[in-house]
Amino acid sequence: MDFYGATPLAELPSHVTICEVGPRDGLQNEKTSIPTAVKVELIERLADAGHTIIEATSTVHPKWVPQLADAEEVLRRLDRRDGVRYPVLVPNLRGLERALDLGVTEIAVFASATESFAKANLNRTVGESLEMFAPVVARAREAGLAVRGYVSMCWGDPWEGEVAPEQVVPVAARLLELGCTELSLGDTIGVATPGRVVALLDALRHHEIRTDQLAVHFHDTYGQALANTLIALRHGITTVDASAGGLGGCPFAGSATGNLATEDLLWQLDGLGIHTGVDLGKLVETSNWLAGELGRPSPSRTVQALSK
Ligand code: HMG
Ligand code: MG
């Protein structure tokens, strides 16, 4: 797609790295069972489209997230390519062992800024879950793995309402202390608005957490994900999480809807002349193929517009 005549906007990066979370965040919430072959094909198509970071699956307890219970099979069958990173979401040492056995080179642990979600998602308090992650991060780092640390509910929580930056900062700081190599700030239920995004980024910066250590992870419940992304880019963020076709959600946070659709993100970034290396046309084809497999259309406005 060519975009002519756009005025370059100040304070934007020339390159954005997209962390494609569709195979994990996108599929974990699907109600019908998705064949392993479809998951593997999805990941391979995403790599074909130019993605270099694809969160492939999770090694959480299979009873907690039955949809991703085939993590081992997905990773065994996947033809992993040079130059593409395939992180896996890992909750505890058992999950790390499973990931290491499969030759995973990158993991993500996932903490919460709120007690209610920590309990619902990890069966732990915030403090207990950080204690659970400590040996996971230490062992993973010893084994030479990169470790992303998610912080969920950074702006709001379905049980506790608005979440203040002061509640997020200590969790983010602790994950870095444990050895995480990157943090992803999750708007799990999609309630953030741009001013509140800036408030959190400012608070983190004030506590000497650099923007180059951060990624943003927006869900699009209120249609704010793109606005939130743009303001985050203007404040120094260059890694953005998104999910092909806008699938996604969290089974343990009822009001969580789909992630920012990668196609919607690409429409904006391509239009701004920001390089990502990801091909929008190939991604739209992939999301239409996946919609056929899932039996319902993609919620992404860009996928819909480009499929007419
Ligand atoms: P628990 O029930 O407290 O587990 O669950 P436990 O530690 O008491 O262990 C109970 C049994 O489970 C033991 O077996 C363990 O071995 C086994 P037993 O000794 O009784 O025979 N077990 C496991 N088996 C396989 N794989 C494992 C594993 N762990 C324990 N990894 C646990 C605690 C953390 C395991 C559970 O709460 C869990 O799996 N939670 C995952 C929830 C989840 O995946 N949520 C969605 C992802 S988070 C998200 O979507 C947000 C994000 O996108 C960012 C955003 O949007 O904000 C990342
Ligand atoms: Mg998420």
Image (cartoon, rainbow, N blue to C red):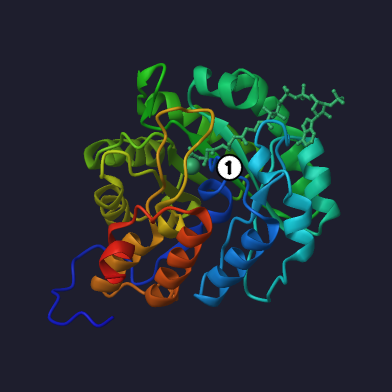
SS for dot 1: strand
x and y percent of residue 116 in the render?
A: 51, 17
Residue 81 shown left or right of residue 201 in the figure: right
Quarter of the figure with residue 193: top left
Measured along the vertical axis of the image, is residue 236 above or below residue 193? below
Residue 261: x, y in percent? 38, 56
281 lies left or right of 19:
left
Quarter of the C terminus within the rendering: bottom left
Query: 306 or 3: which is nearer to us?
Result: 306
- Residue drawn where x is 52% and y is 23% of the image: 117
The residue lying toward the viewer, choosing from 83 and 14, is: 83
Q: Nearer the viewer, residue 191 or 248?
A: 248
Work out whether 248 lies above or below 116: below
Residue at 77% in and 40% down: 95
Mark yes or no: residue 186 visible.
Answer: yes
Q: Would you say 99 lies left or right of 11 here? A: right
236, above or below 109, in the image: below
Q: Which residue is mark 1?
A: 149
Residue 107 x/y as whole percent: 67, 50
Q: Quadrant of residue 38?
A: bottom right
Ligand 1 falls in quadrant: top right
- Quadrant (top left/top right/bottom left/bottom right) for the N terminus: bottom left
Q: Residue at 72% across / 43% down in the picture?
A: 69
Query: From this viewpoint, is residue 88 visible?
Result: no
Query: Would you place residue 86 above or below residue 232 in this image?
Result: below
- Mark 1: is the Cβ under 8 angstroms from ligand 1? no
Q: Residue at x 24, y 42 (%)?
A: 194
